[in-house]
Amino acid sequence: MARFSFRKRPTEEEELPEGEGTGEEEGAEVSVPDEGGERAGGGSRRLLIIAGVGVILIGRWYLANQLFLAPPPPPPAPARPAVPAPAAKAPAPAAPTKEAAPAAPAKAPSKPEQKPAAPAKAGAAPPAAPAKPESAKAPTKPAPAPAVAPPTNFSLQVGAMVMEENAESLKRKLDEGGFSSVIRKGTAFVAKQVVTVGEPTGKREAEDLSRRLNVDGFPSQLLAVGNKYTPQIGAFFNLDEAIDLARELQKKNYHPKITSKPANTVVFQVRHGKFDSRTAALRRGEELKAKGFNFLVVRE
């Protein structure tokens, strides 16, 4: 197989070395002509083709970006209508001056005619009265101060007698025991014990019985009971006195009867002390009870 040499081809000026033949011999090396020029021309064409392909690719990418990838431009903002500026007003022409007329003589001012007031129509509302100034209003009265309740006082009532002599006797006993007291006059509903004889009968029979009682020492008077009458021997506020009289009548063979009747009569109240509280009054009452006096706490 023949071998090729890629060494530089000798020029014509160079001489062939001796011993080398010009003819081709089997196994001899044959020089190949230089292919550098052809290779240089093929390389430039390749560069041009590559550059053209690159330009085409770049052009396609730009078109695809503009058509499909780039966002659409924003819509333009609507234009506002221009507002015309107000036109400047032209100065008004001055009014033509007139020659001054001679002044007329001054007249006396005439009085305004007074028209009679029209009569008010029926049903028309009367004119509202003028409001009074605040200074003319009546002064407001100050609110009254709350009434202060007087202090409550208590006292001890030792007795209440219809007979004033009995009240005086009780007062003397209290004063001697060291408990000063006073007598006050008042009224009260007191049970009155009325002593009568027999049953109510006609007036003639009642008068005959009353005369007999008078003869026996029991003065009496007729007491009306409806349409009938009965002799009344006495009326007592003390029940014991009424019982004593009834016993004396029985001894004379009479049939007495005691009737209790409430009566609003004058009484004499014997009271002691003045205390700020009921507790203090009760403490003093215990002292009176130890001395043998009954008591009742009352308000003054």
Image (cartoon, rainbow, N blue to C red):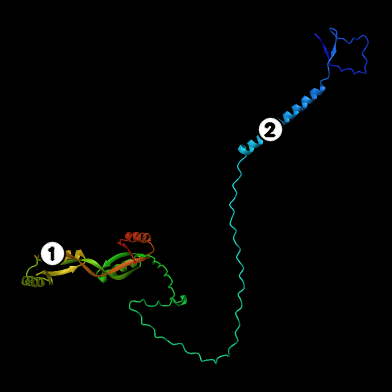
Question: Quick one: SS at disc 1?
Answer: strand
Q: Position of residue 199 (x, y in %)?
A: 9, 65
Q: Quadrant of the C terminus?
A: bottom left
Q: Quadrant of residue 279?
A: bottom left
Quarter of the image with the N terminus in it:
top right
Q: Nearer the viewer, residue 127 or 98?
A: 98
Left or right of 221, for residue 34:
right
Q: Residue at x 32, y 60 (%)?
A: 289
Q: 32 left or right of 289?
A: right
Decide which of tag 2 and tag 1 comes sooner along the chain. 2
Q: Is residue 27 left or right of residue 124?
A: right
Q: Amino acid at mark 1?
A: Lys
Amino acid under disc 2: Ile
In the picture, the disc for residue 133 is none
* Label annotation for residue 56: 2
Mark-to-mark CA distance, 2 and 1: 159 Å
Q: Which residue is mark 1?
A: 257
Quadrant in which residue 269 is drawn: bottom left
